[in-house]
Image (cartoon, rainbow, N blue to C red):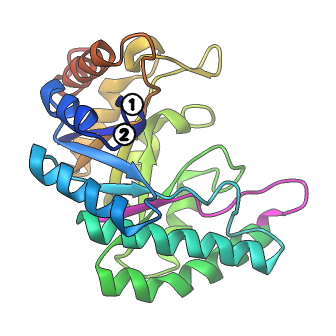
Amino acid sequence: MKKGICIGTLPGAISEEGFALAVEAGFVGVELGTLNDDETRRKAAALAKKHGVEIPSIMNSAHWAKPLSDPDPAVRQESVDGMMASFASAEAADAGTVLLVPAVVNDTVNYEEAWIRSQFEILGMLEVAKKKKIDIGLENVWNKFLLSPTEFAQYVDQFNSEYVTAYFDVGNIALYGFPHQWIRTLGARISKVHVKGFDTSTRQFTPTLLGGNLDWGASMDALSDIGYDGWVTAEMPQDRDNPRDGCFALSAEMDKIFAGDV
């Protein structure tokens, strides 16, 4: 599997310092957020090339504030526009996936509305995804939507497209499910994986990957069983006191998880 880190964990954002540290700490990929102008996209691509790392994925930035499930068509269009910027970012950086939170259920948007609206908008994006050969990786988050692995699989399958996949987050799912079970159900639908620390007893994320009580061995066994050998990217907060040491410690934790030494 390939070891990645999110840009937010690195110091200096899109900078020489951040990319150099990622490489020094042992990461081979850096996931970015949406880049909203061509100059920043060129800069990120150049830094990745210079330091010999890949940019495997772009984390779309608009889907929480402007969800595809919003009742207002104008808001949904803003969300689509954000995805178009994410596609452009991915194309410039040669990234294969754009992460998308497909919908948000709340007191004004019911489950059926979230499903139908997001389905319609994603269908409208598929032509762009196909043309650019960039998949839309739907992530499981705390959005009160797609709350079982079978339902998540059904949602992905309805598009009947290799360009709609699952971006599976091991930490997020632990609030309401068991990661290894979800992995086996989603199977080949999984295109990318996020990891973060989580403690089910406190129902809180942890500042380190191994600081919670997740069964990493079970998750890694499940990934192996489905034949997954792609990107595993840590989505962790930056160590504000010592980001350099924090990145090295995070890399070492991932090595332990990969080796089954946890």
Which residue was labeled with disc 1?
A: 9
The 10 Å Cα crowd at callout 2, few under 14, some 14 to 19, many 20 or more, is many
- Left or right side of 242 for 80: right
- Left or right side of 46 for 232: right
Given residues 245 and 130, the one toward you in this image is 245
Which part of the image, by quadrant, shows the N terminus? top left
Secondary element type, mark 2: strand
Q: How many marks?
A: 2
Q: Which residue is found at the position 78% from the left and 63% from the top?
A: 111
Mark 1 and mark 2 in contact? Answer it, CB < 8 Å.
Answer: yes
- Left or right side of 103 for 234: left
Q: Is residue 103 magenta?
A: yes
Q: Which residue is found at the position 54% from the left and 32% from the top?
A: 174
Given residues 249 and 11, the one toward you in this image is 11
Residue 178 lies, in percent from the top left, at 50, 35
Tell me which amino acid carries mark 1: Thr
Give the residues drawn in magenta, as a range: 95-111
Tell me which amino acid carries mark 2: Cys
Residue 19, placed above or below residue 40? above
